Amino acid sequence: MESDMSGMKFSTALIHGGVHEDGGTGSVNVPIYQTSTYAQENIGGVPKWEYSRTGNPTRAALESLIAELESGAAGFAFASGLAAETAVLSLFESGDHILLSENVYGGTFRLMDKIFKNFGITFSLADTTDAAAFEAAFTPQTKAILIESPANPLLTVTDIAAVAEIAHRHGALVIVDNTFMTPYLQKPLTLGADVVLHSATKYLGGHSDLVAGLVVVKDASLAERLAFIQNSTGGVLAPFDSFLLIRGIRTLAVRMDRHALNAEKIARHLAAHPAVRKVYYPGLETAQGHAIQEKQAKNGGAMVSFELAPERDIKKFFPALRVVTLAESLGGVESLVCHPATMTHAAIPKETREAVGITDGYLPLTVLNMLALMLGAFLTWHIAYRLRGLAFGAKVLLLSTLNPIYYVSVFWVYSNTLSVPFMMALLDLAVTIYSSKSPLIRFIGGISFSITFIFAYFIRPTAVIPVIALVFCVFCYRGRLFAKETLINQRFPKIWD
């Protein structure tokens, strides 16, 4: 039974929109028409159903529903979000240019860069949050813009109405990926967009049990072109998955309300946490584009992105999670987390990712750790060299690198813990300096020791460092005794001579 959404509130339309009953049996759920073909009465006719690539009643019910929810002219269901995007991009031809928002899903970038570029369709990235910079990126060949708002993964907000006005002035179509918001929170077609995309795998499906993509277009001419592409390329959604997706959409309102409520609480908690460097969530008053988000969407949505503080170990963070699961995708009833630089956005070149703020996260820490090891080794050699010459410095450096603590330090470098490499530097300094008979060298070494200790303490203020430092201070007071009692000194009694 076809619905009439006029006068219905959105939450009601989720349940009663599209084709919500079976006319033949009265079933309140649309049946799964698990068939590839349909019997025809005679040749030469134009039957409503002929082949399930061209049309299927279960898929048609879904397509009708999403078109109504997005306030569009027609909807189209595909086997995945990228299949849907591929169909939309197939509207263009060789020589055309497409503008992408610079903060874009990695799969979209890969599709343009590795597939459609081969067909002569070019693209470039533009900052859609800056109207002047965005308009300057247009060329005479620009035929469309493809944006996300909020964008994946930094949740930058674009004024859809503003960029749509600019794009239409240049004769370009406006394509909006509305996956993160869904039509419950934001309706791009009412803001000036021409085409809306969804990875329906996410919030629309809502249960992490299907893969699907949806497209809604604003006018009949686009609908006719896209219907031809859908039938010709054949990346359609199967009947059973169409049924599951309809079922998921029925509960979209109650799920998104709770998702958004939880997301805001988590964002505010993370924003106040000392282990977090920065939080990205459009619902926060301090967020980029917060005022625009309030104007064009119901709330800040259900996605939260954040960066750990530089001294935090990202390789330890993910294994330590208990309730939240490390996985690609989003929008299910479970909470998921991912690392964009190595997962969803790995297809985007590193320099492009970093230019828009999508960093690898843990690489800067690794560089700092290697510098810490080098610093410790250099200080050890330099003081030993100043103490008794080049040969003695080389011996001390060799012994320090043979020390098992050095190898423990190397292991911790690749686990991104700064304190242990610095402790290695402290131990090397202690072994070298406290063995000296010269009060001057002990004094110089003590200053170097203190500087290294302070640096280590402020980078990782754990309880272990002050305790070890206290022990070293005792050794410093009894320097000669420490040197004589070490295993090295007992085994190699002449090494210090």
Image (cartoon, rainbow, N blue to C red):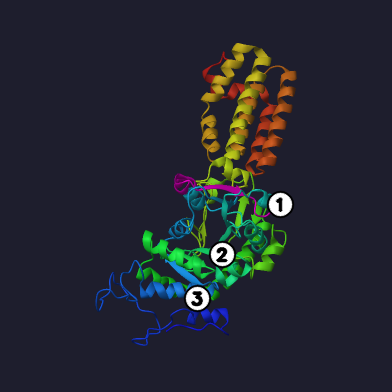
Q: Secondary structure at mark 1?
A: helix
Whether residue 340 is situated above or below residue 34 in the rendered picture = above
Whether residue 163 is situated above or below residue 73 in the rendered picture = above
| Residue sitting at x 75%, y 19% | 440
Q: Nearer the viewer, residue 261 or 398?
A: 261
Badge 1 crowding class, 10 Å Cα cut-off, few under 14, some 14 to 19, many 20 or more, is few
Q: Secondary structure at mark 2?
A: loop
Label 3–label 1 contact, CB within 8 A:
no
Residue under numbered circle 1: 132
Badge 2 crowding class, 10 Å Cα cut-off, few under 14, some 14 to 19, many 20 or more, is many
Residue under numbered circle 3: 251
Closer to the N terminus: mark 3 or mark 1? 1
| Residue 120 among those drawn in magenta | yes
| Residue sitting at x 53%, y 17% | 492
Number of numbered discs: 3
> Percent from the top left, x then y, of residue 416?
57, 40
Whether residue 89 is situated above or below residue 442 in the rendered picture = below
3 vs 1, front mark: 1
Quarter of the image where one finds residue 417: top right
* Residues in magenta, as a range: 113-132
